[in-house]
Image (tube, rainbow, N blue to C red):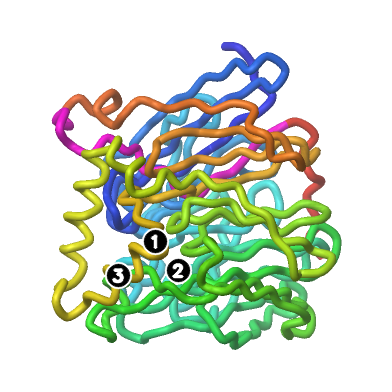
């Protein structure tokens, strides 16, 4: 098999509007920037659901598919074949089905920390059926997890809980003392990223409205200002923040990455990549892939499915504000946007995957010039049982980039 310098692993959750309830799969997009050659492979895993975020162990032996279906699922990096699976229900039963081990943080080549139920748990790849509780995570519903530059702190965002309500909090685990700190914020923040050198991290707001003003299981995109907070992991305090007025297309973010000069995150609601200047935290620039209302007409199956599933999420007459704000956020588009976004280790290439348009794009960084774009086949090619008239989206979600010259992995204290 030909070797490619880059392997862009993208979690797949199928063609639904709500990726938390769909399929569980992985797409690996292999790419050679010198020639533009590429290859891809797509695999869905039976008996698993809610594919959400892939991760690769530091030794690059196996991949992890984080999901909302209460499984720890691992796959072979080269073939995407499943190599192991463990039900997390044997350790702790969550109070809602969307509370799964969607993300993890590696402590070394085999040990990792992830959230199950009300606790953070430590696992070893060599004995997955044995685990130990690290500490209560302290959040309503923990989500994205990252490790700070020194390796001492594990930081994680939180989702709004179907019954406990709005989150507005992030968590910090001190791996040296085993203590957990909760940081209260003005907004809910699902996703975080760590500073490349300092023990700082950045939390990006994820603002929604609950259906019928109380139901956070069926939320709609909120047309409100968005925030990015710079937080000191040691002190647990906000140092600076960026606030964008609601007209800035920065709504419903997914992957967050970082360069030496910019905080970078992609948006599923607005179909953009937002790049915030780290020096000032006051200016930003954009990559805009939104097709607009007319452009989305070129995707009739995707648009009709989005419309149909939106109507299933809430009564139109009592939730008309949710539909109106969602159209303002999407700028009239009826297909969702960019969920995957990763910067290469040498900061020369920016990889993105657009869920609604079903394509992978490679941009030059920092110029943001488009280098390559590849539209992938529809779901029907990988599952012959899917009818031709069905929404063909593969369901791109979070991603992980494997490339040359990886960033050195921090040593655990």
Report the quarter where the N terminus lies. Answer: top right
Could you tell me which residue is drawn at 76 percent across and 79 percent down? 240
Q: Is residue 96 visible?
A: yes
Left or right: 31 with respect to 75?
right
* Boundaries of the magenta span: 386-403
Q: What residue sits right under mark 2 in the picture?
A: 116
Q: Toward the viewer: 410 or 330?
A: 330
**CA distance separating discs 1 and 2:** 7 Å
The answer to whether marks 3 and 2 mark residues whose Cβ atoms lie closer than 8 Å is no
SS class, disc 1: helix
Q: Nearer the viewer, mark 3 or mark 2?
A: 3
Q: What residue sits right under mark 3 in the picture?
A: 324
The tag on residue 276 is none
Image quadrant assignment for residue 44: top left
SS class, disc 2: strand
Percent across and percent down for residue 130 are: 50, 59
The answer to whether marks 1 and 2 mark residues whose Cβ atoms lie closer than 8 Å is yes
Is residue 388 magenta-colored? Answer: yes
The crowding category of the residue bearing disc 2, from other C-alpha atoms within 10 Å (few below 14, some 14 to 19, many at least 20), is many
Percent across and percent down for residue 359 are: 45, 33
Outermost residue toward the front? 294
**CA distance separating discs 3 and 2:** 36 Å
Q: Toward the viewer: 77 or 232?
A: 232
Q: Earlier in the sequence, mark 1 or mark 2?
A: 1
Percent across and percent down for residue 311 are: 17, 63
**CA distance separating discs 3 and 1:** 39 Å
Number of labelled discs?
3
Could you tell me which residue is drawn at 47 percent across and 82 percent down? 167
Q: What residue sits right under mark 1 in the picture?
A: 88
């Amino acid at each position: 098999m030909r070797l490619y310098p880059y392997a862009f692993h993208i979690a797949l959750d199928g063609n639904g509007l709500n990726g938390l309830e769909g399929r569980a799969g992985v797409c690996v997009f292999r790419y050679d920037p010198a020639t533009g050659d590429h290859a891809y492979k797509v695999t869905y895993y039976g008996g698993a659901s809610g594919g959400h975020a892939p991760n690769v162990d530091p030794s690059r032996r196996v991949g992890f598919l984080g999901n909302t279906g209460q499984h720890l699922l691992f796959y072979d990096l080269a073939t995407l074949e499943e190599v192991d699976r463990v039900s997390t229900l044997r350790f702790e039963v969550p109070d809602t089905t969307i509370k799964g081990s969607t993300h993890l943080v590696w402590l070394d080549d085999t040990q990792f920390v992830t959230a199950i139920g009300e606790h953070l748990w430590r696992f070893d790849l060599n004995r997955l059926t044995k685990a130990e509780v690290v500490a209560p995570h302290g959040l309503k519903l923990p989500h994205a997890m990252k490790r700070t530059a020194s390796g001492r702190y594990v930081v994680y965002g939180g989702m709004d809980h179907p019954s406990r309500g709005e989150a507005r909090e992030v968590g910090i685990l001190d791996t040296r003392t085993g203590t957990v700190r909760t940081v209260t914020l003005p907004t809910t923040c699902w996703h975080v990223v760590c500073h490349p050198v300092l023990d700082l991290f950045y939390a990006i707001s994820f603002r929604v409205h609950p259906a019928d003003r109380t139901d956070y299981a069926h939320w709609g995109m909120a047309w409100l200002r968005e925030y990015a907070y710079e937080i000191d992991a040691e002190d647990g305090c906000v140092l600076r923040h960026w606030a964008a007025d609601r007209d800035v297309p920065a709504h419903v973010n997914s992957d967050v990455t970082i360069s030496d000069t910019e905080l970078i995150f992609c948006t599923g609601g607005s179909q953009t990549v937002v790049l915030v200047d780290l020096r000032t935290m006051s200016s930003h620039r954009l990559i805009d892939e939104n097709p607009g209302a007319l452009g989305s007409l070129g995707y009739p199956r995707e648009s009709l499915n989005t419309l149909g599933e939106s109507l299933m999420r809430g009564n139109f007459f009592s939730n008309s504000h949710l539909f109106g704000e969602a159209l303002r956020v999407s700028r009239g588009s009826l297909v969702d946007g960019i969920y995957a976004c990763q910067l290469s280790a040498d900061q020369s290439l920016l990889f993105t995957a657009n869920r609604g348009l079903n394509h992978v794009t490679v941009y030059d960084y920092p110029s943001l010039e488009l280098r390559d774009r590849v539209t992938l086949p529809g779901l029907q090619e990988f599952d012959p049982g899917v009818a031709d008239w069905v929404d063909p989206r593969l369901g791109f979600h979070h991603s992980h980039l494997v490339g040359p010259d990886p960033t050195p992995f921090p040593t655990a204290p």
